Image: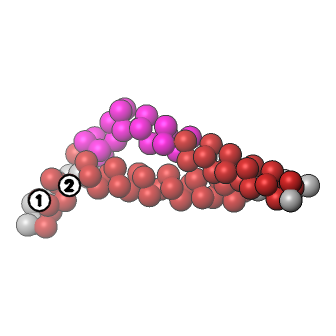
Amino acid sequence: MEKVNHQKIIIRTLLKFLLLVFIIFTINSWPSIKQSFSGNTPPFDYWLDHSFKFSNIILILGFTAYFYYKDLTDQRELIEKANKQ
C-alpha cells in the first residue's frame, strides 16, 4: 500500500503560495510599478502597506489551504485507484 507523499504536496503548495503572493503583490502595486518606470519610485513601505492588506492575506491563506487540500485529495484518489487495479 502506498502512502501519501506529504513532502511533495508541501513543496508544490509552497510554490503555488509564492506565485500567488507575487501575483497579488504585482496586481496591487501596478500603479506604483508604472510610476517607477518613469523614474518616480514611491517608497517600498508604501508598496507593502498598499499590497499586503488584511483581506489580501486572508485571500492568500485561503487559496493556499485550498491548494494543499486539493493536492492531498487528488493524491489519495490516485492511490486508491492504483490499489483497486
* Measured Cα–Cα span from mark 2 to mark 1: 9 Å
Q: In terms of secondary structure, what is the magenta stretch mainly?
A: helix
Q: Quadrant of residue 78?
A: bottom right
For the residue carrying disc 2, how many other residues have a C-alpha within 10 Å: few (<14), some (14-19), or many (20+)?
some
- Near-viewer residue (74 or 68): 74
Q: Residue visible at 35% across and 55% down?
A: 23
**Amino acid type assigned to the residue bearing label 2 in the image:** Trp
Query: Which residue occupies the extreme right position in the image?
Result: 1
Residue 69's disc number: none
- Near-viewer residue (55 or 78): 78
Residue 5 point in image, percent of width and height: 76, 56
For the residue carrying disc 1, how many other residues have a C-alpha within 10 Å: few (<14), some (14-19), or many (20+)?
few
Q: How many marks?
A: 2
Is residue 85 rendered magenta in the image?
Answer: no
- Near-viewer residue (14 or 36): 14
Looking at marks 2 and 1 on the same chain, the residue that comes earlier in the sequence is marked by: 2
Residue 46 point in image, percent of width and height: 22, 45
Query: Which residue occupies the extreme front position in the image?
Result: 85
According to the picture, the residue beneath numbered tag 1 turns out to be 35
Q: Residue visible at 38% across and 56% down?
A: 22
**Amino acid type assigned to the residue bearing label 1 in the image:** Gln
Q: Looking at the rendering, in which quadrant would you find the N terminus?
A: bottom right
Q: Residue visible at 69% across and 59% down?
A: 8
Disc 2 versus disc 1: nearer the observer: 2
Q: Residue visible at 52% across and 45% down?
A: 64
- Horizontal relation, residue 67 to residue 1: left or right: left
Q: Which residues are magenta?
A: 48-65
According to the picture, the residue beneath numbered tag 2 turns out to be 30
Visible in this render: residue 6? no
Label 1 SS: helix
Residue 12 point in image, percent of width and height: 60, 58
